[in-house]
Amino acid sequence: MYIIAGLGNPGREYENTKHNIGFITLDHLAEEHGIRIQKIKHKALVGEGYFSGQKVLLVKPQTYMNLSGESLREIMSFYKVPVENLIVVYDDIDLPMGGLRIRANGSAGTHNGMRSIVANLKSEGFPRVRVGIGGGDTHGDLAGYVLGGFSKEQKELMEEAVKKAAAAVTCMVTQGVDKAMNRYNVKAKTAKKKKEAEEVNE
């Protein structure tokens, strides 16, 4: 069984903000695989289902971002799932907007949600999918930037990133983390250039 957690903040005012890209990706995965994320368990909204026969639990912690680890600690303990079978999807301001980076493990970096998870699980040994939201003008107000919405141009870029992030998670569950890293660890600029090249060749 795999636990797939998307990070974000509960509440309508945060629904379509940069900091909620984890929630947005989970919703896309749920729709794609016919899973309903509606049960409230362990301080989270959860939904059970299968990816190509592999059982998964989609998790959206409802604790607010900074306490995400409390919910995941309860879930991991209840289901007795090994830490390497936890996949966390979250926003990363250090990656360019629309970029994607998959890692099999590693530190929490500056992300408060990830810091909470690492502290609560006492482990960094779980895979994660980072979705880039960086590159925009924060005007010195980082919190305001990450809790803000997307411009029309950003929205189109992020819709594509969410699709790729969801595909990467599915690949991680069904084919393994290494395969997903090889396939989806592409910088946003590289992906954009590739798309432009494809359009030229059409």
Image (cartoon, helix red, strand yellow):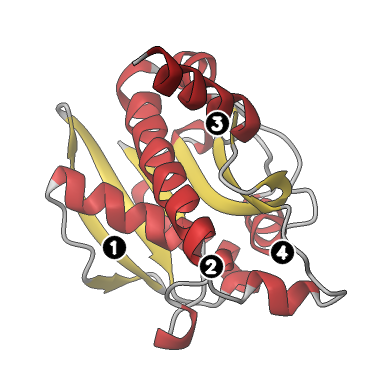
Q: Amino acid at mark 3?
A: Lys
Pick the residue in front: 16 or 88: 16
Residue 129 on image: x %, y % = 54, 39
Mark 1 vs 4, N-terminal side: 1
Mark 3 vs 2, N-terminal side: 2
Q: Quadrant of residue 101?
A: top right
Question: Which residue is disc 4 drawn over?
Answer: 112
Is label 4 in a helix, a strand or a loop? helix
Report how many numbered discs are placed on residues in the image: 4
Residue 133 on image: x %, y % = 63, 54
Question: Which residue is disc 2 drawn over?
Answer: 151
Is label 2 in a helix, a strand or a loop? loop
Observer-side mark, 2 or 1, equals 2
Image quadrant in which the N terminus is located: top left
Is label 3 in a helix, a strand or a loop? helix
Is label 1 in a helix, a strand or a loop? strand
Mark 2 vs 4, N-terminal side: 4
The numbered disc on residue 133 is none
The numbered disc on residue 192 is 3
Mark 4 vs 3, N-terminal side: 4
In three-dimensional space, the C-alpha distance between marks 4 and 3, rounded to whole angstroms, equals 30 Å
Image quadrant in which the C terminus is located: top left
Q: Residues within 10 Å of mark 2 (few under 14, many from 20)?
A: few
The numbered disc on residue 46 is 1
Residue 79 on image: x %, y % = 35, 49
Q: Amino acid at mark 4?
A: Asn
